[in-house]
Image: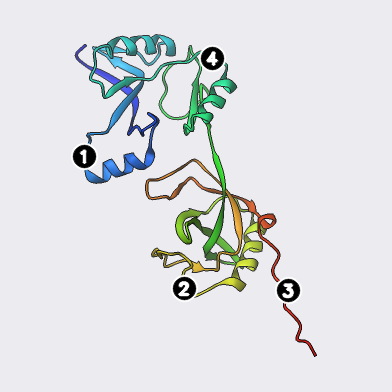
Amino acid sequence: MKESIIDGEVIVPGPDGLSDFGALQSELATGRSDKLVFYAFDLLYVDGYDLRDAPLLARKQALDAILTGAPKRFLYSQHLAEDGPTVQARGCEMQVEGIVSKLKDSPYRSGRSETWIKSLCKKRETFPVVGFVPAQAGSIAALYLGRREGSGLVYAGKTGTGFTGETARMLRERLDPIAVRKSPLSKPVKKPKATSVRPEILVDVEYRAVTEDGRLRHASFKGVRDDLVGPKPRKRRPTQ
């Protein structure tokens, strides 16, 4: 083989061998490439032959053949011809970000198409709200989230999706009365558009992964968890 065009993805494996997005960010930020690994999953062209109209399985077989003896940092992404839900469930148990499924006889086409889908393994967790970005008409544009670490509260990222117009206005009505000048975070972050609040409201958030610095990726609001907040102590009446 002299020339080829391969479709794949660059990752940095974590200690468990799975792709670690935070570690990839750190590696790219340093300008180094020692830990980068290339996972090859499709072959478009090789030595003058355009393979894009060939069936997927034929392209995968050719890809597997040309990667034989390749450096260890070039890995072949195997094709699993198994039951889709079973594979996805197992992948989610392993905490992968998602599973890509393709029709075995499909040609290669750039961009999204009906011949392949990505099933995501989303995570869900509860976070205290530490701030919000105001919007017009008494609404919000985004929520800023915290995470408990010991006795402190650190920044966990933000979510600007998952709200309906009514939900966004309801959140604004509840957040305005608990606004504070000083951030409740142990280590404040610069968010000039944010209004800080006391971390009294808990929300459920769905996300795909967490970066190395603890920020949520692709976070989406799912609801307020009033059931996890204890009742407020009643004010004692003065005795006569």
The residue most toward the right is 240
Front position among marks 2 and 3: 3
Secondary structure at numbered mark 1 = loop
Marks 2/3: CA distance?
26 Å
Give amino acid for label 4: Glu
Residue placed farthest to the front in the image?
A: 240
Label 3 vs label 1: CA separation? 58 Å
Mark 3 closeness class: few <14, some 14–19, many ≥20 residues within 10 Å:
few
Seen at 49% across and 33% down, the residue is 95
Give the class, few, some or many, for how many residues have Cα within 10 Å of label 4's Cα (few <14, many ≥20).
few
Q: Earlier in the sequence, mark 1 or mark 2?
A: 1
State the residue position of label 1. Answer: 32
Q: Earlier in the sequence, mark 4 or mark 2?
A: 4
Left or right of 185 on screen, residue 46: left
- Can residue 222 be spotted in the picture? yes
Q: Point out which mark residue 182 bears.
A: 2
Kindly report which numbered mark, 4 or 3, lies closer to the viewer in this rendering. Answer: 3
Residue 142: horizontal and vertical position, in percent?
A: 52, 58
Question: Which residue lies at the image location 62% right of the left edge and 59% below the top edge?
Answer: 168
Q: Name the residue: 43% across, 14% down.
A: 56
SS state under label 3: loop
Determine which residue is flagged by label 3.
Answer: 234
Q: Three-letter amino acid code at disc 3? A: Arg
Mark 2 or mark 3: name the one nearer the start of the chain: 2
Lateral position of residue 34 relative to residue 189, left or right: left
Label 4 sits on residue: 82
